Image (cartoon, helix red, strand yellow):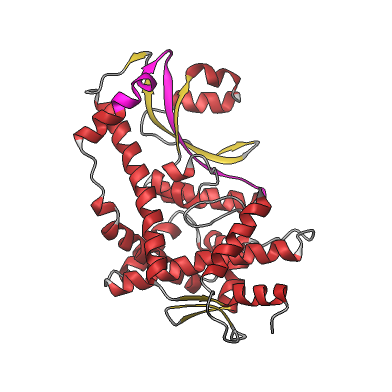
Amino acid sequence: MRLAAGLATVVLCFSVVTGCKKTPPTNLAAEVNSRPVTFADLDRQYRLQFPNPNPETSEDQVSIQRLEVLRSMIDNEIMLQRSEKLSLVATDSDVQARFNDIKAPYTQEEFKKQLDGRKITEEEFKSQLKRDLSIQKLFNKEITSKISITDKDVADFYNSNKASFNLAEPQVHLAQILVTTSPDPNVRNLRGDKAQNDEQARQKIQMIEARLKKGEEFAQLAQNYSEDSNSAPNGGDMGYVPESAFEQAHPELRKIVVGLQPGQTSPVIRTPEGYRILKVVSKEPAGQRALNDPRVQQTIRETLINRKDQLLKAVYYEVSRNEAKVTNYLAQSLFDKASGSK
């Protein structure tokens, strides 16, 4: 399965090279609309995502990982250029305000340790914040503002899933953000962000917890950073969990969930799978929920909005790639090397 995913990445990356046989510049990994992406940039991002590489990782596996990182960088560069074109670039005051919010829960020493753990300087961090905020402004204008859920959409969803609103026993509607400690390159989230070990996972979940306390949306943070491939695309939504399921859960986990009220989030929880933050969306007694129940309406609307948001973002990325002129020199050089081309 991993080999298939890797080959798919190589095919995708090579597809933007077809027809371009000029000698790759030695310092460029790619060009996006004539704007360079250097190998120094790629190496920096690669170290961020794979700071403690497994010595048993083969050369081919490393190449696949680098191609995946580069493809994410290319996508982000395309989005950044579109935000520039639409005059949606984050201002310095936007960046400083977000920087202050993120830094606020920490002492100067603690924050420096966070940056050192990610092998990034304060200026590099602010530069990344500027890119992220600019892309978020782009998504808000081009995607979020265009999502509309009608009453008919809600009714159609309810009628198609009516049985799921008939609860045989009390249930808890849960969402989660999960950060694991294993260096699994197959984890996917919007940021392509993956902790490689326990220390990184602990720092990452603490960063997420701090941002939640500052009022950032749980669903957006889950989409950007959660390492659970099943729930992350849906904003961390795990759906309804029967109360009986918690009988087998760890006592501390069961105690926390029982004690949370709808809308509240848990502290960081250490579990065998990694670090979690849970959110109780709602608690539902047994029985059939009617369509006019405000909780049903909210649940359906959130579900449909998350689905459309994910779909439109995927479509927007594909359309944007079609309109961009991209040359992936890394993919070209790897292909030439494999085929013996000069």
Residue at the extreme right of the image, as rendered: 56
> On the rendered structure, is 121 left or right of 292?
right
Task: Report if residue 159 lies within the magenta region.
Answer: yes
Pick whichever, 184 or 218, lies toward us.
184
> On the rendered structure, is 71 left or right of 333?
left
| Location of residue 142 in the rendering, given as x and y in whole percent from the top left corner | 28, 59
Question: Residue 134, can we see it?
Answer: yes
Pick whichever, 137 or 151, lies toward us.
151
Location of residue 117 (image quadrant): bottom right
Pick whichever, 41 or 72, lies toward us.
72
Q: What residue lies at 48% left-to-right and 18% top-to-bottom? A: 243
Q: What residue lies at 25% left-to-right and 35% top-to-bottom? A: 153
For the record, the magenta segment spans: 158-183
Question: Residue 119, can we see it?
Answer: no
Q: Which quadrant, please, contains the C terminus?
A: bottom right
Task: Report if residue 228 lies within the magenta region.
Answer: no
Q: What residue lies at 30% left-to-right and 74% top-to-bottom? A: 85
| Location of residue 240 in the rendering, given as x and y in whole percent from the top left corner | 43, 26
Q: Is residue 306 above or below residue 158?
A: below
Q: Is residue 162 above or below residue 91?
A: above
Pick whichever, 105 or 99, lies toward us.
99
| Location of residue 113 in the rendering, given as x and y in whole percent from the top left corner | 58, 61
